[in-house]
Image (cartoon, helix red, strand yellow):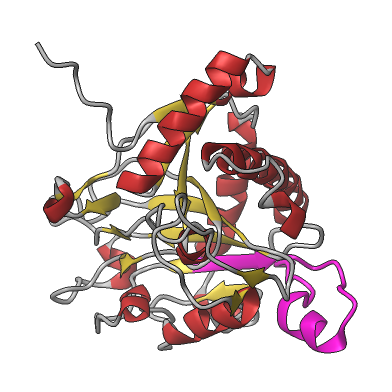
Amino acid sequence: MSEPRSPRIPTIDLRPWLSGDPKARQRIARTVDQALQSAGFLLVTGHGVDPSLRSRVREAARRFFTLPVPVKEAYEARVGGRGWLRSGAEANGYAEGTETPPDLKESLTFATHEPFDDPETDAEWYAPNVWPAEVPELRPLCEEYLGKMAELENRLLCLLGEALGLERDFFTRHMAHPTYGFNINWYPGTEVVGEPEPGQFRIGPHTDFGTVTILDRQAGKGGLQVYTDPADGGAGWEDAPYDPAAFTINIGDLMARWTGDRWRSGRHRVLPPPADAPAEELMSLVYFGECTPGTLVESVPPPVGRVAYEPVDSHAYLRQKLDSITVG
């Protein structure tokens, strides 16, 4: 009898990895490598982030999202900026060349704010965050949460370096002064966003743009789906596995380029409000890991890498991608 196949999107308990047991670390590194070659996604538990913190961030954010639109408009921002993005501001499918109707979500978006050493870079990537005065508790909660995400990102990047058979600091050495993006995505029901148009999603099909995405999500009928290519034995679009204790991790386009396409940038979408549950409301906390501005991303050569991409400036690449999804 053949052995059962490992899941395409496995759940990794980080505690054995952090404990330093060599055999456990090797086993986890192999599992991560296989998962990122297949789907570009995995789930992690044992991360040490208090679930009550995640709940409190959501509760505070919902108090903002349910404010009247004219109040929220005082905080309106462009895609890639800091503040509120109204429903219809983005169409993520545009990033892969698919013209879809605008995405059915609202977002609060925050990012790195510590100054860099160049005025142009500061203006582009380190502008001050805009915190809603109507929900003063949101700022300390988000800052605490983002501190936890930075720690988890570094641990994940060390794991990814070893999973490639490279130095443990292969990625973290480029994170001395990284940027990051943080979106709180609100997916209300049709009473807020209206009936979906044909081909319209809460978030259209796309891949993320940076290095590592750390997602805290809620289960729902109109939730996250992941694509695996049937030509490679995949299942096409399918619901992502869910564990309330886990973070969903996926890699983005820059990481895929960095690995010479050994690893797959995880393609995904978020379904529209379901016809049989039109009032369904979900909220996701999405941390987008990025490098220090000016990082030159060069593909790892064979036998690890499989495709040699032209080197790219990490943040010139990110800006082009952000601009591509801006429609509102």
Residue located at (69% from left, 44% from top): 154
Q: Is residue 120 left or right of residue 253?
A: right
Q: Nearer the viewer, residue 32 or 61?
A: 32
User: Which quarter of the rendered picture does the N terminus lie within?
Assistant: top left
User: Which quarter of the rendered picture does the C terminus lie within?
Assistant: bottom left
Quick check: 261 above or below 47?
below
Quick check: 186 above or below 169?
below
Which quadrant of the figure has residue 100?
bottom left
Asked if the magenta segment contains residue 318, the reply would be no
Q: Is residue 107 left or right of residue 237?
A: right
Residue 262 percent location from the top left of the image: 40, 53
Residue located at (61% from left, 43% from top): 166
Residue 14 percent location from the top left of the image: 57, 25
Residue 112 percent location from the top left of the image: 74, 65
Which quadrant of the figure has residue 120?
bottom right
Q: Tell me if residue 9 can be seen.
A: yes
Residue 274 percent location from the top left of the image: 18, 55
Q: Tell me if residue 136 can be seen.
A: no
| Residue extent of the magenta highlight | 107-133
